């Protein structure tokens, strides 16, 4: 709960015009925000640009900030909405995910890199094929570790809807990735 209190305290200071408090929030949340956006858009430069938009929105909405939920829930609602806005502007968005993998000592590092790139490509294509709400639900749950309740607040839907989004996303991913799994490519 310490981070929760720190973030709210910092944001309330920002609300009162404290620029160094805003800089602390940016420094603390910049990398996770960029990584979340990157997983959604698949382009590091674009992710950094969107992150800048997010932090401008955070700063501009500071006067209206009300600590009704965790700061991260409020922040990721802004992240999600900004990603959706970007998606509406550009229909050619891809997602990229990272797997924590223990390398096989029998394989050369070059083989591992090539294999990883190929399997990431299959996963990226499968994730990209998901409807946008399923895609962001997967990113928020699996890569940001948010609870169903937090995701429901971000997406403005019920917890049951989040369960349904994730269930259908998993079915879709399973269907799209099954041929690659059978061939041992993933």
Image (spheres, rainbow, N blue to C red):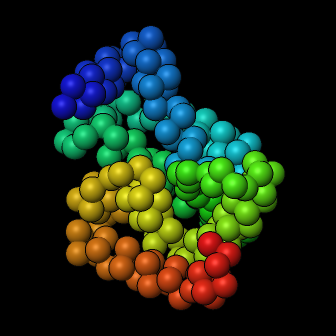
Q: Is residue 6 visible?
A: yes
Q: Is residue 72 left or right of residue 139?
A: left
Expressed as whole percent of the image width and height from the top left, the position of residue 140 reads: 42, 56
Q: Is residue 72 above or below residue 172?
A: above
Expressed as whole percent of the image width and height from the top left, the position of residue 45 reads: 74, 43
* Residue 124 or residue 101, whichever sits in front: 101
Q: Quadrant of residue 158?
A: bottom left
Expressed as whole percent of the image width and height from the top left, the position of residue 146 reads: 33, 52
* Residue 51 or residue 137, whichever sits in front: 137
Q: Quadrant of residue 160?
A: bottom left
Expressed as whole percent of the image width and height from the top left, the position of residue 115 reads: 73, 63
Q: Is residue 155 left or right of residue 55?
A: left
Q: Is residue 86 above or below residue 161?
A: above
Q: Is residue 42 visible?
A: no
Residue lying at the far front of the rendered structure:
106
Q: Residue at x 47, y 59 (%)?
A: 139
Image quarter of the C terminus: bottom right
Q: Residue at x 22, y 43 (%)?
A: 69
Q: Residue at x 44, y 11 (%)?
A: 20
How many discs appear? 0
* Residue 173 or residue 18, whichever sits in front: 173
Q: Residue at x 45, y 25 (%)?
A: 28
Q: Is residue 169 above or below residue 80?
A: below
Q: Quadrant of residue 157?
A: bottom left
Image quarter of the N terminus: top left
Q: Is residue 102 left or right of residue 121?
A: left
Q: Is residue 17 above or below residue 161?
A: above
Q: Is residue 133 left or right of residue 166?
A: right
């Amino acid at each position: 709960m310490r981070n929760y209190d720190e973030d709210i305290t910092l944001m309330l200071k920002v609300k009162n015009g404290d620029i160094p408090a805003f800089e602390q929030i940016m420094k603390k949340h910049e990398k996770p925000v960029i990584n979340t956006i990157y997983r959604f858009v698949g382009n590091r430069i674009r992710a950094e640009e969107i992150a800048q938009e997010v932090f401008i929105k955070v700063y501009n909405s500071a006067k209206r900030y009300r600590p009704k939920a965790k700061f991260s829930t409020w922040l990721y609602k802004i992240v999600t909405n900004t990603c959706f806005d970007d998606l509406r502007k550009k229909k050619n968005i891809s997602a990229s995910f990272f797997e924590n993998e223990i390398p096989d000592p029998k394989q050369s590092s070059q083989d591992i890199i090539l294999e990883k790139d190929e399997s990431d490509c299959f996963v990226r294509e499968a994730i990209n094929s998901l409807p946008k709400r399923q895609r962001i639900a997967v990113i928020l749950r699996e890569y940001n570790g948010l609870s169903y309740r937090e995701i429901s607040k971000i997406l403005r839907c019920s917890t049951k809807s989040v369960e349904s989004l994730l269930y259908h996303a998993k079915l879709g991913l399973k269907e799209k990735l099954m041929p690659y799994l059978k061939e041992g490519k993933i």
